[in-house]
Image (cartoon, rainbow, N blue to C red):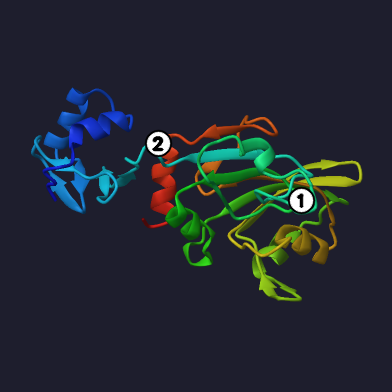
Amino acid sequence: MHDPDGIRLQKLLAGAGFGSRRACEKLISDGRVQVDDQVVTELGVRVDPAKQVVRVDGDRVVLDSDKVYLAFNKPAGVVSTMHDEEGRPCLADYVGHLSQRLFHVGRLDQDTEGLLLLTNDGELAHRLQHPAYGIPKTYVAQVHGVVAKDVGKQLRAGIELEDGPAKVDSFKLVDSLPGHSIVQVVLHEGRKHIVRRLMEEVGYPVEVLSRVQVGPVRLAELRTGRYRALSSEEVAQLYRAAQL
C-alpha cells in the first residue's frame, strides 16, 4: 500500500477538496480512509494517485488531476459526436477548445436536448453506458394528447417494440395542457430513440424531449449550450453507481 515515491495521502486528499491538510489528517487517523481497500490510519503513507484507489467513507476519490468530468446541456439540433462529416452542429462546437480528449457517456438524438455527461475517464464512461449497471436516466417530455390513467401501468409492464420488449422504471404525469401533456419517464434502457418509440407505441407521440438526470447527476439550472464541472460528490456517486 505504501509507495515511497508517492505523494503524502493527506496532501492528495486536501487537493481533492476534503479540506485542509489537518482536516485530512483527522480523516486518516479516524480510520475513514482506505487505500486499495485497506484502512489507513498512519499519517506517513504515500500513494501513487495514478495506480492506487483511495476511498473516503467508502466513496472513491478521484486523485488524478488530468481527469475531467462535465455535465453539458445539449441543445436540440446538436449531434452527440465530436465531429460530424455532414457539418452539423456537434459537441466540439461547445467543448472542442478543451485540451483533454473527451468521451460522451451515451448519446442523445439530434432532436433531444438535455443532460449529457462528458469525461476522459474511459473506464467510468464504459460502465455508465453498460446495461449491466442499470444507470437510470430521467426524461421530461411534452407529448401530444391528454395521457390516459393506464399509460404508466402499460409502460411499466413492458411494450413490445420491433427490436424486442422494453419497459420504464417509472412514469409520472407532470402536467396537462390543452391537447398536450408533460410526462416524466425514468428508465435505464439505452436503445436508440427508446423514449420516443415507447410513447409512440402507447399513442402519445413526443413533441419535445429533454433528459434532466443521469444517475445521481441532475441538469438543474444549467443553461442550454453550457457545461459545468461535476462536484467531487457527484463523481463519487457516479463511481458508486458504476461499482468502481
**Residue under the point 52% across and 42% down:** 217
Residue 224, how many percent across, how many down? 70, 33
Amino acid type, residue under disc 1 in the picture:
Gln
Residue lying at the far right of the rendered structure: 179
Left or right of residue 126: residue 182: right
Residue 203 drawn above or below residue 212: below
Give the label on residue 76, or none. Answer: none
**Residue under the point 46% across and 40% down:** 68
Residue 167, how many percent across, how many down? 65, 66
Where residue 97 sits, quadrant-wise, is: top right
Q: Report the front residue among 242 and 36.
A: 36
Give the Cα distance between marks 2 and 1. Answer: 30 Å
Label 1: state its secondary structure. Answer: loop
Q: Nearer the viewer, mark 2 or mark 1?
A: 1
Residue neighbourhood size for the residue with mark 1, other residues' Cα within 10 Å, grouped as few (<14), some (14–19), many (≥20): some
Quadrant of the frame with the C terminus: bottom left
Where residue 136 sits, quadrant-wise, is: bottom right
Residue 153 drawn above or below residue 219: below
Left or right of residue 107: residue 86: right
**Residue under the point 28% across and 25% down:** 19
Left or right of residue 187: residue 28: left
| Residue 150 visible at all | no
**Residue under the point 27% across and 45% down:** 55
Label 2: state its secondary structure. Answer: helix
Q: Report the front residue among 81 and 221.
A: 81
Q: What residue would you read off at disc 2?
A: 232
Give the label on residue 110, or none. Answer: 1
Q: N-terminal of the two: label 2 or label 1?
A: 1
| Residue 113 visible at all | yes
Residue 230, how many percent across, how many down? 48, 36
